Image: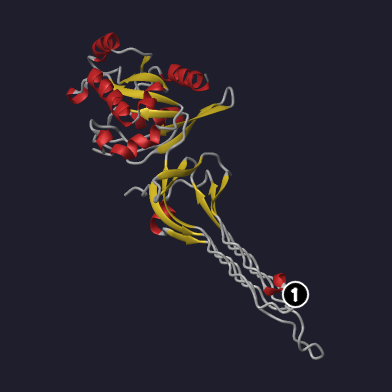
Amino acid sequence: MGTMFVDEAKVILKAGNGGNGCLSFLREKYRPNGGPNGGDGGNGGDVILICDRNVADLTNYKFVPHASAKNGEPGRGSNCHGANGISRFLKVPEGTVVINNETEMVAVELLKDGEKILLLKGGVGGKGNINFKSSINQAPRKITLGTPGETGEFTFVLKTIADIGLVGFPNAGKSSLVNILTNAQQTEAPYPFPTLNPKVDVIHYPETYQTLTIADIPGLISGAHENHGLGIKFLKHIERCKMLLFVIDIAGIDGRDSINDYWTLLEELAYYDRALLKKKCLIVANKIDLPSAEEHLLAFKKAVNGEILAISCAESIGICELRKKVLKAAQS
């Protein structure tokens, strides 16, 4: 059984309240009616988000959806101010979108490792009575209370960030291709959805010390934009990929029609967000080593516009050329 991958979680967050100001007067043996000496309350802690590339998904927030910062301490006598509340730092993966559930608007996005964003501000500490002493009022009995910290209900949504996003129907060979390009070991199986979770791997170019990240995303089916199959779980993870690699089964195994598959992929992307069609892309015709693949490839090239590269993951045909093309396309 695979590890659960959580790419969406609802959370309830609260910043700390400010501590109350203190009402106090100096009381010493020879100064029984001393002046005010109540200190201020401390500020409440903030809720701060930290983008961390070492965090893979949002699992932590799925099972622990509540988090709060510490309250500021109240002021004390002898002009002692309360300590500020400790802020709450929440680590999230690169590519996390934070949606305010009340407004349904995007509050913040965290894209780069190490990025810090203040999400909720802690309350302000109240004033002790020492602040209200004047020539008119030498013994003020006035203080102010600390203000409440900000609260909010949010939805964290993870959208994968990668240089290359693989787009294709189940069993088109996406996992096999990633294995070859990255030396990764992903599940390969002759049934739908062997890849159930987005996974980002790295293509290394030792000769130039360059790297590209490639996202193998769950296979698409017709109607995905209506959340059929893995639906939106798939589509939202290609929004931030710099380029798309369409992986097409060109051999027509199990009666598949490569031309229809390609147009269906484009339709699903367009239904979800037409901006996806403006991304740089390369079409990979996989399984060119199988019978009738050459014939299907000729028909495919006549029907489809765009750069098409025929490959075979099983026989490692065209892989070197593909590595060069994706590097050039991703950097252009």
Q: Quadrant of residue 286?
A: top left
Q: Quadrant of residue 74?
A: bottom right
x then y, percent, for residue 206 = 56, 26
Tell me, yes or no, if residue 214 can be seen here. yes
Residue that extends furthest to the left in the rendered view of this protein = 255
x then y, percent, for residue 151 = 47, 58
Q: From the viewer's side, name the closer residue of 149 and 227.
A: 149
Residue that extends furthest to the right in the rendered view of this protein = 30
Q: In the rendered image, which residue does mark 1 sit on?
A: 136
Tell me, yes or no, if residue 195 can be seen here. no
Q: Quadrant of residue 139?
A: bottom right
Q: Looking at the picture, does residue 38 appear above or below residue 265? A: below
x then y, percent, for residue 228 = 23, 38
Left or right? Give the position of 263 relative to 57.
left
| Label 1, residues with CA under 10 Å away: few <14, some 14-19, many ≥20 | few
How is this picture coloured?
secondary structure
